[in-house]
Amino acid sequence: MKDNDVVMVSACRTPFSRFESPMTSLPSIDLAMVVMKEVIGRVGLDPKEVEEIYYGSCVVAEFALETDVPARQASLLAGFPAEVFSVTLDRACCSSLTTLRLGMMAMRAEGVKVVMSVGSENMPRTPHLAPGLRSGTRIGHIKLVDLLFELGYKAKGFNSVAVDAGEVAVEHGVTREMQDEWAVRSHERCLKAYEEGRIKVGEELTPVVVPQAKGEPVVIDRDECPRRTTREALAKLRPVYGSPTVTAGNAPPISAGSSAILLMTREEARKRGLEPLATVVAAVSAATEPRGIAVIPAFTIQKALDRAGLSLDDMALMEINEAFAAMPLVSTKILAGGDEGKWRRLQEITNVNGGAVAIGHPVGASAGRITMTLAYELRRRGGGYGVASICGGLAQGEAVIIKV
């Protein structure tokens, strides 16, 4: 252990919402404020002691309802001094691991000692757009554009991500039935984690209080989407957007939520008497050809392992974000290198408390979520190495290796 190691000293997230939920009335900026206050409050840190804040959010149209610079707005409204540096970035679903990696870079290159990594999104609040309206409309209908429809980049000629994920899954021998089975497992594992107290307020979760026009506020203190389902029920669903395999059942809910991780140098944590949740061993980025969204977690995990001088055999647990059920299945198969037994073993240690198919996927917040889920579960099991990876639109990737 070295004094300049980067360690996680606090981490929390809001519950992730259903598409229709009282929580989705709150701007993503407000959701970010909840976790930004909580993550420092848990370790008794004064807001003025946070030197830099890196904030990920990628549904720009939603926070555009409050104009822009959500990181700056959230930090000021949450009580952080005006002098605190903040930056907002968009790297699609990778965003809140990119924020962690950039925070680490600031710590190593500039001597920063206390950094906050935040991700926040409220996808159901995304407004419809009326392009061209500002230039004037004569007689005729106004066209509205729904940015959530098809979940892709078709305006510039790219596919829906559901199409790319489904097609690449089929090319790797990952069938619709396998994806439905994984989705059922995701819900079952998540519900079991709740039943056994492995996802709880005060650890991974912090509640969201939603004021009401009349009556008491609504308190949301658990993820809203995990449910009981079966392979037979999921088999009845039709694929979406022309995908060969992706359905509403083996894809995650469109959600609202926020996550935050507080980073320090080990020396700084020791001075403050704080026990680290985990040491960040390596954090890397990657990208591949745009349709390879289902394979990029595998490439990014391997890059992180190479960077750290470790192997898959060293990993006690893995988290691979379930942007669709295809992602962990395809990526673990690639990492297994054609060894069926190894593929099954990797699946067993991946997303042990369920994943985004059950929990939800507020895209800017999910990378932070899988990282803290990994840290808390490793601690629960007595420690070890773990790796978390996430894909982002047009086949971007981030991965982090931590040690507890």
Image: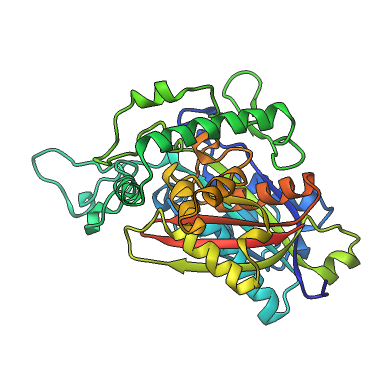
Instruction: Identify the residue at image location x=41%, y=21%.
Output: 233
Q: How many marks?
A: 0
Q: Quadrant of the N terminus?
A: bottom right
- Please indicate whether residue 93 sits to the left or right of residue 142 in the image: right
Q: Which residue reaches farthest top?
A: 215
Q: Which residue is pictured at 54% across the width and 35% down the height?
A: 186
On the question of residue 88 being in view, the answer is no
Viewer-nearest residue: 133 or 360: 360
Q: Is residue 185 placed above or below 7 in the rendered structure?
A: above
Q: Is residue 44 left or right of residue 291?
A: right
Q: Position of residue 11 (x, y in %)?
A: 71, 51
302 over 9 or under it: above or below: below
Compared to residue 46, the image places residue 264 above or below, namely below
**Where's residue 348, x and y in %?**
60, 43
Quadrant including the C terminus: bottom right
Residue farthest along the bottom direction in this orientation? 109
Q: Quadrant of residue 151?
A: top left
Residue shown at 77%/45% (left/top)?
Answer: 381
Q: Is residue 62 visible?
A: yes
Q: Residue at x 60, y 67 (%)?
A: 305
Give the color scheme: rainbow, by chain, secondary structure or one colour: rainbow
Asked which quadrant contains residue 387, the reply is bottom right
x, y percent for residue 79: 70, 54
Please tell me in which quadrant of the rendered image residue 352 appears. top right
Q: Is residue 186 left or right of residue 162?
A: right
Q: Position of residue 68 (x, y in %)?
A: 46, 57
Q: Is residue 76 above or below residue 225?
A: below
